[in-house]
Amino acid sequence: MDVDNILIELEQVCFSYNSLRPVLIDLDFILSKGEGVSLLGANGSGKTTLFHLIMGLLKPDSGRLSVFGEERRVRKDFDDIRRRVGLLFQDSDDQLFSPTVAEDIAFGPFNLGKNREEVLQVVQKTLALLGLEGYEDRVTYKLSGGEKRLVALGTVLAMRPEVLLLDEPVIGLDDEHRHRFINILKEGKLSYIIISHDQEFLKEVTGRQYLLEGGRLRCIS
């Protein structure tokens, strides 16, 4: 394996919310550049917890976490990760907080330092990419579940991240938008980890599959 292409590496990572029930046990994992992998497991098995560890929202009890070639230990080590890694939450309502669709998608690019004209271009391109032209002034909380999912995806893609962590990305999408998103993943030469129970979707967009069970992670394909 070319170590220069490793984007995310976890070695012997352990995590528990309390001492009585470990969530992750001696977990090893590598994501390489241009790779799409899936993360399978029952509800509550620790899949979302793994995403939160990568983003620095949680801290491992032990083990080593390296992202973009640097070991990450304390909060400040993760500042650049949150600009370079896009996390899609399982619940879209946790991701959307602005009054309108355009404001939600513009929030990230503004925080990256883009000017107003640049941000407007990003918003338009992102909405077109997702088939949401004309949604700029739609009130976010009034959208359907599927529409909220697409806008949440838009907030992540608008940041132009180097890695995507996608938690159930196609839940609630109709066939048209599902196929559109599959094409985005296939054609974008992106690096990503996907949590999903949709096996047909995963077969189309991922190579290796991992199963998280009993706190341990193993490659199953």
Image: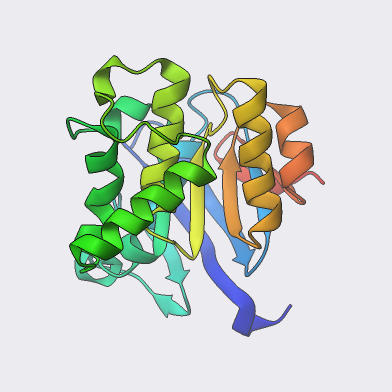
Instruction: In this rendered view, identify the residue nearer to me: 78 or 118.
Output: 118
Query: Which colour scheme appears in the figure?
Result: rainbow
Which residue does the image show at 28% across and 15% down from the upper left? 142
Q: Is residue 62 visible from the viewing direction of this image?
A: yes
Where in the figure is residue 56, as x and y percent of width and height? Answer: 31, 56
Residue 37 can be seen in this image: no
Residue nearest the viewer, comparing 70 with 167: 167
Residue 39 location in percent, x, y?
A: 62, 41
Q: Quadrant of the N terminus?
A: bottom right
Residue name at image x 38 percent, y 32 percent: 134
Q: Is residue 60 left or right of residue 63?
A: left
- Residue 208, image x, y percentages: 75, 51
Q: Splitting the image into 4 quarters, where does residue 151 fall?
A: top left
Q: Residue furthest right?
A: 221
Taking the image as shown, residue 178 lies to the left or right of residue 76, namely right
Position above or below: 210 against 110: above
Examine the rendered structure and indicate whether residue 180 appears above or below residue 118.
above
Q: Nearer the viewer, residue 40 or 82?
A: 82
Residue at the spot 18% in from the left edge and 35% down from the top edge: 98
Residue depicted at 36% across the width and 31% down the height: 135
Across and down, in percent, residue 147 comes to 43, 24
